[in-house]
């Protein structure tokens, strides 16, 4: 990581990465919405990043990463996910709470401290939401498609965004669909019909709209051991799963 980056610059890099994963460019308006800032403030931040060689910015067209910018963005996301894992595993915060709190101090940690946290946590594979934690050398994150993109026979591990609606989180909790749980797609009805998945040995039916709000990491085959599929992750009781 570049320790000279400001908090606003790192947050902008993270947002640009998420908005450009499908190969499109990130536009100022979309970045402003994601970051909760004015378009003028975002434009100023992007110009600073462009001047330092992290992004290519074409006015009125969009933003793309340079090679060093993309690696720096992945590093910023890695930093956030490690801090989330520390807050959840070591301090007992619920996953949505950890997401909000991590932003408050993740940017102040020297790289050496961050790596010690990572080692102390026994090199976790995912953040509390279920999203993969990249290595320090990675320049790209593993894909996390939505659950509805899977086909019958596919196996995956669930991840939920911190922006997931609290009522939906509660509903998914009643179905056992929490971060880190393994699912197997049993059936997918045609014409945007419902999806049937197996969760902890039980079949669950999800509508297309709900299934698209659940993100997953694909697995080659079922683990055969539910305990191992959630190893190193916090199983959050339904009563704790709320929006911070």
Image (tube, rainbow, N blue to C red):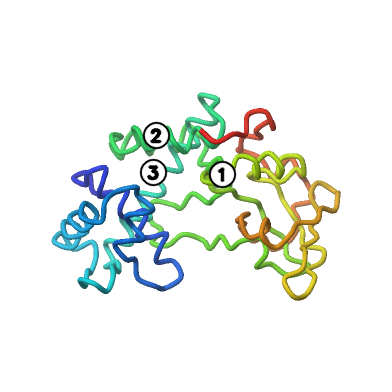
Separation of residues labelled 3 and 1 (CA atoms): 14 Å
Q: Residues within 10 Å of mark 1 (few under 14, many from 20)?
A: many
The label nearer to you, 1 versus 2, is: 1
Q: With 69 as the anchor, is 167 left or right in this view?
A: right
Disc 1 marks which residue? 129
Residue depicted at 77% across the width and 68% down the height: 193
Q: Nearer the viewer, residue 108 or 95?
A: 95
Residue depicted at 66% across the width and 35% down the height: 235
Q: Nearer the viewer, residue 167 or 131?
A: 167
Give percent across and percent down for residue 97. 50, 32
Disc 3 marks which residue? 79
Give percent across and percent down for residue 128. 56, 40
Residue depicted at 67% across the width and 42% down the height: 230
Q: With 4 as the anchor, is 79 left or right in this view?
A: right
159 over 211 or under it: above or below: above
Q: Residues within 10 Å of mark 2 (few under 14, many from 20)?
A: few
Mark 1 and mark 2 residues within 8 Å of each other at the beta carbon: no
Residue depicted at 28% across the width and 34% down the height: 108
Q: Secondary structure at mark 1?
A: loop
Separation of residues labelled 1 and 2 (CA atoms): 21 Å
Disc 2 marks which residue? 116
Q: Residues within 10 Å of mark 3 (few under 14, many from 20)?
A: many
152 over 176 or under it: above or below: below
Q: Secondary structure at mark 2?
A: helix
Q: Which mark is residue 232?
A: none
């Amino acid at each position: 990581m570049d320790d000279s980056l400001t908090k606003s610059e790192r947050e902008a890099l993270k947002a640009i990465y998420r908005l450009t994963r499908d190969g499109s460019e990130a536009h100022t308006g979309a970045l402003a919405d994601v970051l909760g800032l004015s378009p003028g403030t975002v434009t100023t931040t992007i110009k600073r990043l462009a001047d330092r060689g992290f992004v290519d910015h074409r006015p009125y067209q969009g933003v793309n990463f340079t090679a060093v910018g993309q690696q720096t963005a992945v590093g910023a996301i890695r930093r956030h996910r490690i801090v989330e894992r520390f807050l959840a595993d070591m301090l007992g915060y619920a996953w949505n709470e950890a997401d909000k709190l991590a932003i408050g101090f993740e940017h102040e940690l020297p790289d050496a401290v961050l790596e010690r946290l990572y080692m102390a946590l026994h090199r976790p594979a995912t953040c509390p939401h279920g999203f993969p934690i990249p290595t320090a050398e990675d320049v790209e994150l593993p894909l996390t498609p939505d659950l509805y993109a899977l086909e019958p026979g596919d196996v995956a591990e669930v991840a939920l965004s911190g922006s997931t609606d609290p009522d939906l989180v509660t509903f998914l909790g009643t179905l056992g669909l929490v971060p880190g749980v393994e699912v197997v797609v049993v059936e997918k009805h045609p014409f945007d019909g419902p999806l049937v998945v197996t969760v902890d040995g039980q079949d669950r039916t999800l509508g297309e709209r709900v299934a698209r709000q659940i993100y997953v990491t694909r697995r080659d085959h079922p683990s055969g051991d539910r305990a191992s599929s959630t190893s190193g992750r916090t199983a959050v009781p339904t009563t704790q799963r709320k929006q911070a």
